[in-house]
Image: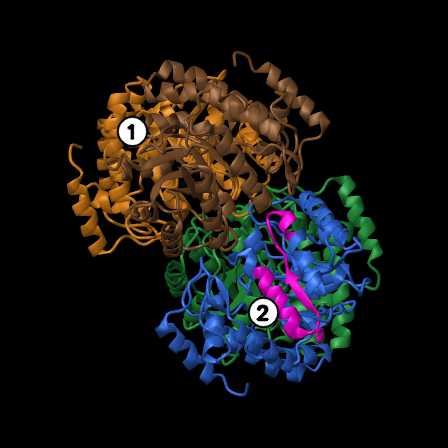
Chain colours: A blue, B brown, C orange, D green
Amino acid sequence: MIPSLLPMPLRGIVPPLVTPLLDDQHLDLPSLDRIVSHLLNGGVHGLFILGTTGECTSLSYAIRRELITHVCRLVDGRVPVLVGITDTAPEESVTLTDHAKACGAAAVVAAPPYYFGLSQPELVSYFEKLADRLSLPLFLYNMPSHTKTMISVDTVKVLANHPNIVGFKDSSANASYFNALLYTFRDQPDFALFVGPEEMMAAAVLMGAHGGVSGGANMFPNLYVSLYQAAKDHDMEKVLVLQEKVMEVSAKIYSLGTYGSSYLKGLKAALSVLGLCKNHLAAPHTAFEEGEVQAIRTNLESITGL
Amino acid sequence: MIPSLLPMPLRGIVPPLVTPLLDDQHLDLPSLDRIVSHLLNGGVHGLFILGTTGECTSLSYAIRRELITHVCRLVDGRVPVLVGITDTAPEESVTLTDHAKACGAAAVVAAPPYYFGLSQPELVSYFEKLADRLSLPLFLYNMPSHTKTMISVDTVKVLANHPNIVGFKDSSANASYFNALLYTFRDQPDFALFVGPEEMMAAAVLMGAHGGVSGGANMFPNLYVSLYQAAKDHDMEKVLVLQEKVMEVSAKIYSLGTYGSSYLKGLKAALSVLGLCKNHLAAPHTAFEEGEVQAIRTNLESITGL
Amino acid sequence: MIPSLLPMPLRGIVPPLVTPLLDDQHLDLPSLDRIVSHLLNGGVHGLFILGTTGECTSLSYAIRRELITHVCRLVDGRVPVLVGITDTAPEESVTLTDHAKACGAAAVVAAPPYYFGLSQPELVSYFEKLADRLSLPLFLYNMPSHTKTMISVDTVKVLANHPNIVGFKDSSANASYFNALLYTFRDQPDFALFVGPEEMMAAAVLMGAHGGVSGGANMFPNLYVSLYQAAKDHDMEKVLVLQEKVMEVSAKIYSLGTYGSSYLKGLKAALSVLGLCKNHLAAPHTAFEEGEVQAIRTNLESITGL
Amino acid sequence: MIPSLLPMPLRGIVPPLVTPLLDDQHLDLPSLDRIVSHLLNGGVHGLFILGTTGECTSLSYAIRRELITHVCRLVDGRVPVLVGITDTAPEESVTLTDHAKACGAAAVVAAPPYYFGLSQPELVSYFEKLADRLSLPLFLYNMPSHTKTMISVDTVKVLANHPNIVGFKDSSANASYFNALLYTFRDQPDFALFVGPEEMMAAAVLMGAHGGVSGGANMFPNLYVSLYQAAKDHDMEKVLVLQEKVMEVSAKIYSLGTYGSSYLKGLKAALSVLGLCKNHLAAPHTAFEEGEVQAIRTNLESITGL
């Protein structure tokens, strides 16, 4: 359990790890081992556990703690481990961070509390007090579709002055907003700016982002790592070839049916087809049924050159 | 710790108890004792703890458990105690219910999980599986401004068939919706229909609702109990006199400033002015400052005849 | 074309008249004659044309003008005619009002402009300038689901001071909000407060509202007039009997399918079954197909005692 | 009045022309002449009049027609003129299109009707019937913040089969969505894909978009034309230099105050400072007051190298 180190700024592909489950109450440890190896072998630059893709809010605190313990043990300091501590009760965020630190995690990630929607001054106050109490560096996480609140550019700017707030992950998919962040922080290159939706990762990196929290990297880590590198190198020819692949994954794996959770369902079904973990989603979500899993299998096979 | 009994259906005023706090991590037990006595002396028909007014989601699980223990002990079976178990992780709801049952609570109350917005079929599946596992009867709780999801009338109708689902609390403030519920359940008088916003409680009871979860009853329990009784008796003259008082409370206590949390801030400030508890709100909220507390004091004094 | 007079305040049932159409470009004048007679014979206290139920925004300005002309001619001063002038371009509202005045209408009704969502100060400024220019008295119209903006209680309070703003129609269905309006205007009995959704009309009138803009009155004017009268008289026994009928209409006619426009589709289909007009909705809406019309017919027949 | 020709696909910077006004009822024709010359001299590839930036929905139909007449006359066939016909009443869209065609416009642009929010099947039906009736080619316009409806990728795909629908403008700012469109239409290079928000124009063009409808081009046409060209040429070094300039404009001109209409207010104030038109916004909007105009002046002067 070697503590993982946090580069300043963090850069690259830091996938939001899915949480492999036997059922709602039990982690699937062999699958966890398999997926972590798969990702590290694929060249990812860090791991983000207990995010939206990791079904964090659906998991009991006991499982959350267990997951942190095992991932840190498996990674063993090879890449930084970031731990999602998003919560409505700050006390629970603090406690989980202490556990993450003891396990060797490098940083934590928190979206706004998601029961009450907060105003911008309330967000500033909330995150400043939280960062004061945390034993690990904090990444802010903008996720307005789930938290009802957009963290404004001005709020991020203020919070970035806190010595314990080191970066930002944006999952709003709003490119005007993200470019405004890049512009605002153009003279603070140590404040890490990551983008969530993988469909816009290449464009974001071309324009100056430090990296992406790309869910598809659970399946095909090397695709996202290569695309990140091509964008960083301004190799547009390569970017356009790989971007088409990323969009094909998005269209064929995440867009089945009209569920709000098509992304989660499709990703875990695909991982089960790839033999990486079971096709189980924690309640309140339910996994795809056999017919849909078969469709995912067919779609996966039609994606060539991965 | 006498177990409290649940009438079928529950009727009357069941206030959402505020949670008196010394600070974010400590209950204020003397104030809790004072408030519970104040409410029971005021004639309320039950207590609902760990609701939105009780700042449930802001509290650590340790405090939630402690609060359940103490309220059940203080009430000692005199009225039914309902316990909020709204959570994003079903496992935590189940565990908290077991604790509530052990303490002598009568029922639990759950809004939809509030990180992911769920579709209606997902809500049916979620609540059916949850009710199967709960050791106490369940009230559904509609709170779309916080959970992003309106529980449709058809969904309530389906869920009401579950033997362990015994009632419904609606905090949408949508009167068309609430009247549709009253019509839908006109031949199922045992399924309890409660309304959250106190401003519409009298009208709801006039049209057939079983009662109200009126936050103002923390301050003036008798006002809401009397208004409920007048509405139940179709005593319109009395209803209109008391309704004006309830609206005066709403206008003068809950509407200070333009905060999304003006209700919470105003209610706790007023309770502090009344000597019932400290003016402390758990993070992410902050209590009114001294100037605003003074305004609440002045407003309180201007409400005559309470 | 006798000018219709506006009582201060207006009271009673003022149905939002459907617009009978031969096709998207042509009014169905015989049906218009039939429906106006049907409503006046049913005892309604006024007519509101070119509202949401009247499909105002879907109609060309030529048809809007034609409709005003004919309704005013048909009504011939027997009840006040209110004309919807909601628009995004104030100039068009002013022009339409001048036409309405020339035809003998009693007042106009305007919701906020509905392309840009406005702030409260912008609403105040917009309505004050508009009312200055209008040749007829103005009712404000709160319709947040379509205009993206809730007209706040404070904004209504300010606007009610304008000599040419005489009342308010609320279609938010939010009963806390509507009761706050009733409380705010308790000492200004001449400012008319009307409620849109018919499911909450009786409760609103019980609590002090002046009347309802009840769409179902296009089908069964006497039902809504009788319910209004019973509520005004505080005759709760009669209220509860008639309210159940109103809710039966709502459940059986407005709730077919999962369309956002189920209300419009159901209402016009029912009117066609009743022989009052053709089953045609102007684009962008489409009328129910034959199978759904048959279901409406069956549902209509199952509503007894109308 | 030479008819302007529409390239297939249209490419480049097609600014959404502001509408210069003397007051709410009168166009400012000298300023219109000046701005059109300014833009054509700046190298823009087309003009889009009567869009959101052009305050279309605030203008009377008389002014809309007048504007079309004059812009087509001034442009005189040098670049294609696109005319916004977004309306809630299809009849008005058709009539305006006939006028635009008579004046020599090249195409029209329509967002969904914006009073009722439509479902996807309703959008398909609406746009197909509209396109059938229009005398000019149609660009679809996605503007969910104003129309309450996102035109889904699948809906665009279906509608692109209509022979009279030739392109799409997206103002959602959602980069995942826009990249999904680029992927979906990768084999239909004649279907024009334009992006609204100028902050994401360069990234969109890098990934394959045909161009941008950049409001800032009203001020600095050459900046946006140069950035478009650099992105099209994959000249990342130049892109990053010019993108920073574009973001500086956005930060300093569009972000003053917390108005929903800060963009409109700032743009017109800046144009007045630049001597291109008066600082007048049509109701329901109001222009910046003198203090804010002065701040815009100072900010403009601080943007160097334009």
Residue C75: mark in rendering: 1
Name the residue at the bottom extreme.
Answer: A305
Under mark 2, the amino acid is Leu
Please state which of the two labelled residues, at mark 2 or mark 1, is closer to the viewer.
2
The spot of residue C65 in percent (x, y) is 38, 40
Given residues A21 and C246, the one toward you in this image is A21
Q: In which quarter of the image is residue A103?
A: bottom right
Mark 1 belongs to which subunit? C
Under mark 1, the amino acid is Val
The spot of residue D124 in percent (x, y) is 39, 63
Q: Is mark 2 on a helix, strand or loop?
A: loop
Residue B11: mark in rendering: none
Against D243, residue C199 (above or below) is above
Q: Quadrant of residue B177?
A: top left
On the rendered image, what quadrant is the C terminus of chain D found in? bottom right
Residue B133: say if magenta: no
Against B33, residue D19 (above or below) is below
Mark 2 belongs to which subunit? A
* Magenta region: A64-93
Question: Dot 2 surroundings within 10 Å: few (below 14), some, or many (20 or more)?
Answer: many
Residue A69: say if magenta: yes
Q: How many labels does the image show?
A: 2
Q: In the shown orientation, is residue A141 left or right of residue C20? A: right
The spot of residue B304 in percent (x, y) is 55, 12
